[in-house]
Image (cartoon, rainbow, N blue to C red):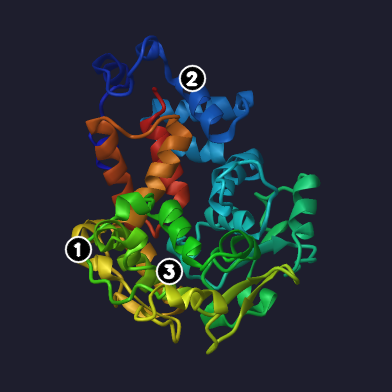
Amino acid sequence: MDWLRTLRGVPLAAVLALGLVASGPGDALAGPREQAKRMHDRLVGVPPTTAVLDSMQASIEADDPVAAAHTAMANPIFYISSLKNFATPWTNVPQTVFGDLNDYTATVIGMIRDDVPFDEVLHGDILYVGAGGGYSNTDNTHYAQLEQSRADLSDPNVLVRRVQSAVTGLPAAATAGVLTTRAAGEAFFSAGTNRRMWRFTAMNYLCRDMEQLNDITRPADRIRQDIGRSPGGDSRIFHNTCVGCHSGMDPLSGAYAYYEWDQATARVTYTPGNVTGKHLINANAFPGGYVTVDDSWVNLWRAGPNSSLGWRGPAGSGNGMKSLGVEVSASRAFSVCQVEKVFRRVCLRAPESVADRAAVESIADDFEAGNRSMKLVFAETAAFCMGN
């Protein structure tokens, strides 16, 4: 939190006068109480009580806006509404905020509430359910009822942590945090070729869609048979366009080879040792292409332009979704992405200025040093943006 440390010992009035926390008309006139209210409104979405506002104001006046943010986040509405709306777009293809509470969003909410290291969101054997039971692998009724009852998700006795494999029946080694929840399976394993799961993992946790990952310099030997090598009779299209995404995506999406969304039973299925049919479709498009024989994956983007994502996983290759989740969540891009998402949510803008980008990098450093606490990310981001 270097940006905040530089302000220690500087009177708030001097900070405001220097414009260090002000960026628009009227911001320089915002005092601690106005800043506290703005912080609470943005984090929680409802006005604070007088007692809470007094406490937050006192923290800001004591040069501790991070403590003020934690006070705001104690409001149950932060979990029931703000975090639910924060995570819901990650759970569906249209990326809409309009969706019921489900096992994916509930798990994100619980992990943030309990300060579970957030890298586990992509590889942990973890699931959050309502204390009364009723979880189903084949419908979302349990979570819809939790939401309809306005259950207090900030209460660990209401939304409780469970071992995912014990609840869903998946083998522990096949669990991959929120990616093996029922909601994720319905959204990203249904139909298609399972490449969709990788695309939305990259979008939601690396903050990059395939256009930003495009790299035509990687070898094409792991591109599957269903991708023609001469689209429209022109091989240049394949080498200059198709390779850019598929040369990196196809080797990674092998991790999903045993997973399927069963439309008939409305549940995720896992068939270890048996590659799902969708990984082998349209083999005649290019019979000489790669044939998926197991759930192995390799990250060819550790070299080339995408090495800038800061891959730091232990291997760069492996088998199954869990090890791929470790690879993604260990990257620097994962850490920065979580901060960028919170920044947009709390600051109501993308980080664009030099100061914004420096703050994002510093908060990402603190995220990594602070046991990957998303609460810390919310608090430090709110402190940075409290004046604008």
User: Residue 27: x and y, percent?
Assistant: 38, 14
Using the image, determine if residue 367 lies above or below residue 291. Answer: above
Task: Name which residue type carries label 2.
Answer: Arg
Q: CA distance from mark 3 to mark 1?
A: 24 Å
- Given residues 113 and 310, the one toward you in this image is 310
Of helix, strand and loop, which one carries label 1? loop
Task: Name which residue type carries label 1.
Answer: Thr
Quadrant into which the N terminus falls: top left
> Picture quarter containing residue 47?
top right
Please give the label number shown on residue 217. 1
Task: Name which residue type carries label 3.
Answer: Gly
Q: Earlier in the sequence, mark 3 or mark 2?
A: 2
The furthest residue to the bottom: 273
Residue under label 2? 33
Q: CA distance from mark 3 to mark 2?
A: 42 Å
- Given residues 126 and 60, the one toward you in this image is 126
Residue under label 3? 325
The answer to whether residue 98 shows anywhere in this view is yes
Of helix, strand and loop, which one carries label 2? helix
Q: Earlier in the sequence, mark 3 or mark 1?
A: 1
- Given residues 52 and 147, the one toward you in this image is 147
Q: CA distance from mark 1 to mark 2?
A: 54 Å
Q: Earlier in the sequence, mark 1 or mark 2?
A: 2
User: Residue 66: x and y, percent?
Assistant: 42, 38
- Given residues 241 and 112, the one toward you in this image is 241
Mark 3, other Cα within 10 Å: few <14 / some 14–19 / many ≥20: many
Q: Residue at x 33, y 76 (%)?
A: 222
> Picture quarter containing residue 278?
bottom right
